[in-house]
Amino acid sequence: MHRRLVVTTVVTFLLLTFSWVAQAADRKLIVLGIDGMDPQLLSGYMEEGLTPNLQRLAEQGGFMPLATSVPPQSPVAWSSFITGTNPGSHGLFDFLALDRATMTPYLSSSRTVAPDWQPIRIGSWQLPLGSAETVLMRKGTSFWETLDANGVAATMFRVPANYPPVATATGRSISGMGTPDIRGSSGTFSYYSDDPDIDYGEVSGGVITPVRARRGHVKTVLEGPVNALRTDLRATTVPLSVRIAPDQHSASIELGKQQTTLKPGEWSNWLEVEFELLPWVATVPGMVRFYLQATEPYLRLYASPVNIDPRQPAVQISSPGEYAHELAELAGPFYTQEMPEDTKALMAHILTPEEFITQSDLVLDERRRLLGYELDRFNEQQGDALLFFYVSSVDQRSHMLTRQADASHPLHDITAPRGQQRAVRQIYIEVDAMVGTVLANLEPGTELIVMSDHGFAPFRRQVNLNTWLEQNGYLKLKNPAQRDDYEWLEGIDFAKTRAFAVGLNSLYINVRGRERDGIVEPADRAALAAEIRDKLAAWVDEDSGAAVVTQPLLREDAYSGAFLEDAPDIIVGFGRGYRMSWAAAAGGTPEGLLEDNDREWSGDHCMDARVVPGVILSTRPMAVTTADLRDLSASILDYFTIEQPPAIEGRSVFRQ
């Protein structure tokens, strides 16, 4: 009897030990990154019972606002999440950065560096001796690099500010925000019509091409990337043919070797396309979706931006390189451009709001399918593992359709269809269902964090910051009569300008020896910046009595780190409802200080960071009452019991 007890005790001890070791070696964490989810809106939807899965998370582990970055712009915020540091350490301060040597703005998250060698020219052709290189501008170490160094395999699905994707030994990643389309742009749609009343040519984010139908047959081209092998650098093209059925009820679309037939109101699947660089030698693959808007009385055909095809990527969009191909083969092709919802086509009035919602639904359907695949693969993994999965839909719909939930917005339409009025509400319901899918597939010992990088506010009034600087004596134009013709800082007389703005929250002092044509002595920079900050804080909208700028910050008060000197001199946090004007963001100086926002882009977050926090929810109880984006990288490392690197400024939400 005694012997049996001893044996039983030993066996039990070994089983418990094995179970503990297995559990300790199988720590798993899923992080859902829901871009733009707002705590105030989410709280309201929870109270209405519309988001039961997020409510369950809130009750189980907690729910709180998540302080965002300064400024609360997506590449800045996600970089703080990725590195656990403030912008002074990761080096991204705005969507746009400024090359002070040439006074040229550029997209901040990555830059393309041309080769040093000149090509060999033979007639109309040229042979490059080196290729351009795209460089990720975000500095610092990502938390998944630290995970990798400590034996935790991380899958990073489309995390923003990660193009080109950071490579690790055991991890997998697909790039998100910052990834271009096949033309190298952030997304350029094409639109074809024979309607004589349409304004043809380039619009922001697209090209409207006139066509002629002969006996119901249209011949045109789909434009691809510039052909760098030609001396004239002309764009590559592929023949596009549209045959309208005699009854006008459908159209057959032929693109190269691909063909599809659509009825008006239908979207195609992805069609593969190859753009020829050198006959029989070099091509660039891509993929495109078509939407047949109408066949009568005129043809109206939309073509999405040509996306990098994940099955045969023209540039590296994943690490390892085969990951994108594998994912597309198993789960189907998917949008690869940085923000797949075509907000630009809606703003150009090519897509209607209802068509935009439908296209957004296509994106969300893809995300659901990809999430299902990643969850299955994640659950099969052995050992410690992290899955990060990014969803853009809340952010993009909130940008475009907040006006229908905001009765005071200049573009609010009380007669708008119910689908538009409920579009923001509905996307929260859809995302809640995705959270439910994850919860239903959580295996024992796996935890879930749901987070967002920022929240949202209505965007009602545009702020012409350069015009304010002009009227207050800090900026001079070369020719004020031509102010509407100037953009990208071209109209500014820098020999007489002490301060200027470009980007969505950035104000620069024109410092001698730093800016190309600087006139402010370096010793006077700080005092001038403080003077402008104080005046901005006193700026009131005469129409409403509201403060226009509620969070003007000197860079020294907002940031610290190795890249502090690269920061704008003042970070301008606008009051709720206000944002930099479209013209001023592009370095323009329009007439008038303030104007109504008259575009479909009616919600925003590039304001005072305190009014647009993100959210954090967790299955694991959180031990704090306030949290910051930088705390999440610390929390993820803490979950896997990894010592926090000195560079990380946050602290774990799971510890007091």
Image (cartoon, rainbow, N blue to C red):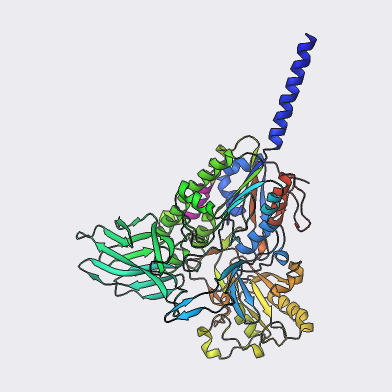
Relative to 14, say whether 215 is above or below.
Answer: below
Query: Is 441 on the left-hand or right-hand side of 522?
Result: left
Q: Closest to the observer: 59 or 413?
A: 59
> Which SS does the magenta portion mostly show?
helix
Q: Is residue 429 magenta?
A: yes
* Location of residue 15 with respect to 57 vertically, above or below: above
Horizontal arrangement in the rendering, residue 192 relative to residue 277 (left or right) = left
Q: Residue furthest top?
A: 1
Q: Which of these two is toward me, 348 or 178?
A: 178
Where 536 sits versus 273, above or below? Answer: below
Name the quadrant containing residue 286: bottom left
The vertical placement of 265 against 231, above or below, is: above
Q: Is residue 1 left or right of residue 216?
A: right
Q: Position of residue 44 (x, y in %)?
A: 58, 49
330 inside magenta stretch: no
Residue 36: image x %, image y %? 58, 57
Residue under the image location 61 percent in, 69 percent down: 108
**Which quadrant of the figure has residue 321?**
bottom right
Count of marks placed on residues:
0
Q: Position of residue 442 (x, y in %)?
A: 59, 38
Residue at image coords 57%, 86%: 491
Region in magenta: 422-431
Q: Position of residue 277 (x, y in %)?
A: 42, 70
Residue 424 in sight: yes
Is residue 537 shown to the viewer in this render? Answer: no
Quadrant of the snapshot with the N terminus: top right
- Front-lying residue, 406 or 554: 554
